[in-house]
Each structure stands twice: as structure tokens, then as C-alpha cells.
Amino acid sequence: MTRLIFALSALAVGTACSSVNGTVDGESTPITSTYMLQDDDYFGDDGVILLVLSGGGLNCEEMNDLLEELEDADDDDEKADLWADYLPEEFWEWRITLRVDDVDDDLGGKEIDGTEWTDLVNDDDQLSAMAIHYTDWPDEDSFSWWGWVTGEATDYYDVYRSDEGVARISGHNPNESIRGTFETEMVDGDGDDEGEVSVSFSTSRCAALDDNYL
């Protein structure tokens, strides 16, 4: 746990340009680490750039270590223990999905519209965001088939989605880094208003996580 505490304090400085102004369901959503992921044919002819902004405190390598250990775990109980070893009991994670014609194109200077909360990103130059609030450590049922049957697989987090809005890409070095803002309204699973936010992101490529998130 000492290593995790050190990582949290160190990354708080390194991700100062990534933050969320505003609240979701009345709560602030602090960011301590960010990852830029991508796939050039995720949508068939179109690619995807996925920005992950997390309060979990793990850098790219540490998150990859956790996911590899989860995959190699002997049972669901071990998975729950690993999660608790690496991550805090409560934190927020943002996932901003940007559909693009070509991941190699420079998006710097572009304004990109957000979709309605019920819609997928059906065309290039569209984006949407999902905010996940992890409220507890998962237990062994959270990783099991039975957990999905009983609902216990999802009872340790809440999900919120963006509703329209606009993103402004202030800088983009294709395949390496991206920065900008996304201003939008957030809603819950019923479409009820949960707050307005302005998400500022500045993150670098983390190719190691592509296969785990995409």
C-alpha cells in the first residue's frame, strides 16, 4: 500500500493539466492519472481514440501490471484481493470515446460535438463520455458469472453519461499525446440531470492498455 500512496502523490503533480471542473451527482471527481489509447479500425473503417482519466492513482505501467495480474489470477477471490491492493476503495474514472476517420490525422484546433446520452458515436468526429464512480472494493462475486446474474457484479460502482456538449482539441500529436477540453452535461441511467462539467485533458499514449480497454 505504501507504493500506491507514493504513486498517488507523485501523479497528482504529473496530471495537473487533467481535471474536471464541476460536479457529478453533487460530487467532485479528482483525477490523478491519465491514459491515451487508440485503435485504427475499432469502428470498421473508422478509428477510436479513448481517453481514460482516473482517480485510481496508477500510471500506465502500474495499471497494466494490475490488469495482467487479474488475468493470471487463480480465482475470483484473488482478483478481489488484487484490486484492493492496487486501487483505493472509492475513486472516479472518466472514459472519453472519440471516433475519428484516421488516428494518424492531427485533430489540433478542431471542435467536436458530443452525442446525446442515448446515442452511440455513429460517425467520425463525434465523442461521448462515461464517468464511473467506484464506491466500494469489489468482492469475489463481482468477477463471477453468478455476480452478473444476481447484480452483485455491478453494485460497487455507478455510471453516468455525457449528454451532447462540445470538445475543443487544443493540441494533438498523433499516436503520442492529446490535450483539450470537453464541456457537457452529465446524466444518470434514467437521463436525469446530474450536473454540468468541463473536463480538461492532457494525456500521453499508453499503448500497453489498448487490448484491455478496446
Image (spheres, rainbow, N blue to C red):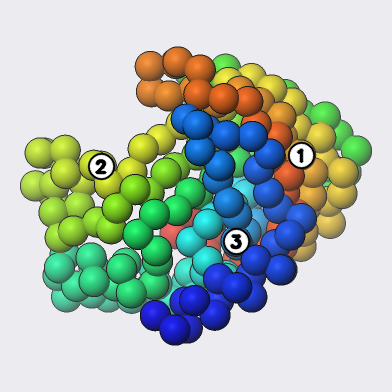
Res 32 label: 3
Which is nearer the eye, 103 or 65?
Answer: 65
Amino acid at the residue labelled 1: Thr
**Disc 3 packing (10 Å; few <14; some 14–19; many ≥20):** many
Asked which quadrant contains residue 140, the reply is: bottom left
Amino acid at the residue labelled 2: Thr
Callouts 2 and 1 close, C-beta under 8 Å: no
Which is nearer the eye, 7 or 140?
Answer: 7
> Counting residues from the N terminus, which is met first, the one under dot 3 or under dot 2?
3
Q: Is residue 162 above or below residue 200?
A: above
Res 154 label: 2
Q: CA distance from mark 1 to mark 3?
A: 17 Å
Q: Is residue 203 left or right of residue 90?
A: right
Q: Report the residue that reaches farthest toward the right.
A: 109
Which element carries disc 2, helix, strand or loop? helix
Residue 44 point in image, percent of width and height: 57, 38
Amino acid at the residue labelled 3: Thr
